[in-house]
Image (tube, rainbow, N blue to C red):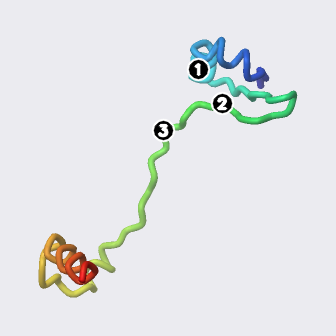
Amino acid sequence: MQTINVRETREKLANLLDAVASGEEIVILRHGKPAARLTSVSPESVAFPDRSELRASLPPANESAAQSIRALRDDERY
């Protein structure tokens, strides 16, 4: 793990990003203490829970979303 101060970070940001892209982890120091960590972004996909049973149990909507929003806005205005 590489450490670097804030001034050097400003001067060498492009090189630091290249290093991070190749798998390095870099800790940025402010006044000699760790302030931030540069790491690569992992392309993890977020798995959302299956809501098909919940959607199937709900009654069908009587109006469109636009109509519902319009009605809510009208109620709030006056």
Query: Which residue occupies 26% across, 85% down?
Result: 58
Per the image, label 3 sits on a secondary structure element best described as loop
The residue sitting at the front extreme is 78
Per the image, label 1 sits on a secondary structure element best described as helix
Gap in Å between the C-alphas at discs 2 and 1? 8 Å
In-image side of 15 versus 50 (left or right): right
Q: Which mark is residue 17?
A: 1
In-image side of 17 versus 43 (left or right): right
Per the image, label 2 sits on a secondary structure element best described as strand
Q: Earlier in the sequence, mark 3 or mark 1?
A: 1
**Which residue type carries mark 3?**
Pro
For the residues bearing labels 3 and 1, Cβ distance under 8 angstroms: no
Gap in Å between the C-alphas at discs 3 and 1? 16 Å
- Foreground disc of the pair 3, 2: 2
Q: Position of residue 56 (x, y in %)?
A: 25, 81
Q: Which mark is residue 38?
A: 2
For the residues bearing labels 3 and 2, Cβ distance under 8 angstroms: no
| Quarter of the figure with residue 20 | top right
Q: Position of residue 46 (x, y in %)?
A: 45, 52
**Which residue type carries mark 2?**
Leu
For the residues bearing labels 2 and 1, Cβ distance under 8 angstroms: yes
Q: Earlier in the sequence, mark 3 or mark 2?
A: 2
For disc 2, the neighbor class at 10 Å (few under 14, some 14 to 19, many from 20) is: some
For disc 1, the neighbor class at 10 Å (few under 14, some 14 to 19, many from 20) is: some
Query: Which residue occupies 30% across, 73% down?
Result: 52
Q: Would you name the residue on which mark 3 appears? A: 43
In-image side of 32 versus 45 (left or right): right
Q: Which mark is residue 52?
A: none
Q: Is residue 16 above or below residue 26?
A: above
Q: Earlier in the sequence, mark 2 or mark 1?
A: 1
**Quarter of the figure with the C terminus:** bottom left
Gap in Å between the C-alphas at discs 3 and 2? 16 Å
